[in-house]
Image: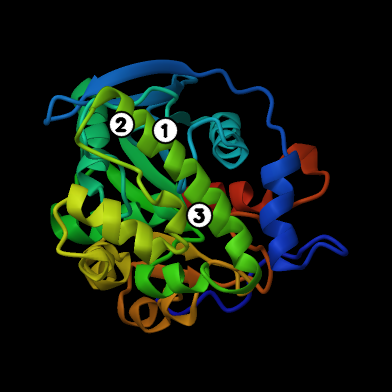
């Protein structure tokens, strides 16, 4: 489809900076009114995923995926779940392996291309035989996983999945990993590396001898982390192989359901390669919206009963 010609998002006064849009919601946003019902489901490799339900008795379900080092409890996930419920949708927020507060049992963890875990969640939902319509909604890494999954599935995607919306998805992982290693964006990188180190140490405690963190402080970039941990643990040749095989950009031509990709022009994590302009123009099922502002998973809205623009935009597209 053609690029969405004019985004409806307008940043609040004095909050148009991409870094402010990224940081302020992370530090200060609180979302009340969401009560989860947790369910732990088994994975085919004898591990588990924790999924959090927020039902209202609907036959429509929104499946929400968080970003790197996020969880179902992040404000942007809770905000989307709350808006789904308000609009009459059941919601399910799934936690990547090791992100629910409980360390997973296997050496493998989550990564940007882990569509097998998303498929496990979807198959579990389908087995309940409750939902006529299922929408996939993802943020950042979760958005990349959804896009890759839909591309892999192509015309074989379950009939119940009828639309998808992703925000701030790093469609081209290699360039995004490089960008976050430069300039002010290194602030985010240092935080991510610290949180990932904590997960490495947790895994070391339950799987002695299978991992070590000797010299971890020498890791200064995502490629260095992914070369040492992500690639070998998840059977990629190296970091570049991981980025190439996990970047959703290469799977977009095969998507066959209406899918909205929203990424802000001032996103501090994304490069020009992460804005799939030609892919959207050539695939009638892809819609690409590029607001001038919004940061990374930001899209702040002041007032409006605490509802952010991204939540309104997602429901608008799903009910279009």
Q: Is residue 80 left or right of residue 126?
A: right
Quick one: quadrant of the N terminus? bottom left
Real-space Cα separation, disc 1 to disc 3, in angstroms: 28 Å
Residue at horizontal 63 percent and vertical 75 percent from the top: 6
> Callout 1: helix, strand or loop?
loop
Write down the residue under mark 3: 317
Disc nearer the start of the sequence (1/3): 1
Real-space Cα separation, disc 2 to disc 1, in angstroms: 16 Å
| Tag nearer the camera, 1 or 3 | 1
Residue 99 badge: 1
Viewer-proximal residue, 204 or 47? 204
Residue at horizontal 79 percent and vertical 43 percent from the top: 304
Write down the residue under mark 2: 204
Q: Measured from the top left, where is residue 243 in percent x and y?
A: 28, 66
Q: Is residue 246 above or below residue 69?
A: below
Q: Can see residue 278?
A: yes
Residue 91 badge: none
| Tag nearer the camera, 2 or 3 | 2
């Amino acid at each position: 489809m053609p690029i969405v010609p004019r985004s409806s998002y307008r940043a609040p006064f004095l909050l148009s900076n991409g870094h402010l849009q990224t940081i302020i919601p992370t530090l200060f946003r609180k979302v009340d009114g969401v009560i989860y019902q947790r369910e732990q489901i088994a994975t085919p490799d004898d591990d588990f995923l924790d999924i959090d339900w927020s039902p209202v008795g609907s036959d429509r379900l929104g499946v929400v995926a968080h970003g790197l080092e996020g969880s179902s409890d992040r404000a942007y996930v809770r905000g989307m779940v709350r808006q789904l419920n308000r609009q009459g949708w059941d919601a399910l927020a799934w936690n990547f392996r090791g992100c629910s507060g409980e360390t997973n049992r296997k050496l493998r963890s989550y990564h940007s291309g882990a569509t097998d875990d998303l498929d496990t969640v979807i198959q579990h939902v389908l087995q309940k035989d409750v939902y006529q319509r299922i929408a996939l909604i993802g943020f950042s890494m979760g958005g990349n996983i959804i896009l890759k999954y839909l591309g892999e599935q192509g015309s074989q995607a379950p009939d119940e999945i009828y639309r998808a919306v992703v925000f701030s998805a790093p469609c081209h992982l290699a360039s995004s990993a490089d960008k976050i290693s430069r300039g002010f964006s290194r602030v985010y990188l240092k935080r991510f590396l610290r949180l990932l180190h904590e997960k490495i140490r947790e895994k070391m405690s339950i799987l002695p001898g299978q991992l070590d963190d000797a010299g971890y402080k020498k890791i200064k970039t995502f490629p260095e982390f992914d070369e040492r941990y992500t690639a070998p643990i998840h059977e990629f040749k190296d970091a570049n192989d991981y980025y190439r095989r996990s970047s959703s950009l290469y799977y977009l031509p095969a998507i066959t359901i209406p899918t909205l990709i929203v990424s802000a022009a001032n996103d501090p994590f994304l490069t020009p390669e992460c804005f799939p302009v030609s892919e959207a123009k050539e695939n009638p099922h892809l819609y690409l919206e590029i607001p001038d502002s919004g940061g990374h998973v930001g899209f702040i809205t002041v007032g409006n009963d605490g509802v952010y623009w991204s939540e309104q935009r997602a429901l608008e597209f799903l009910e279009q």
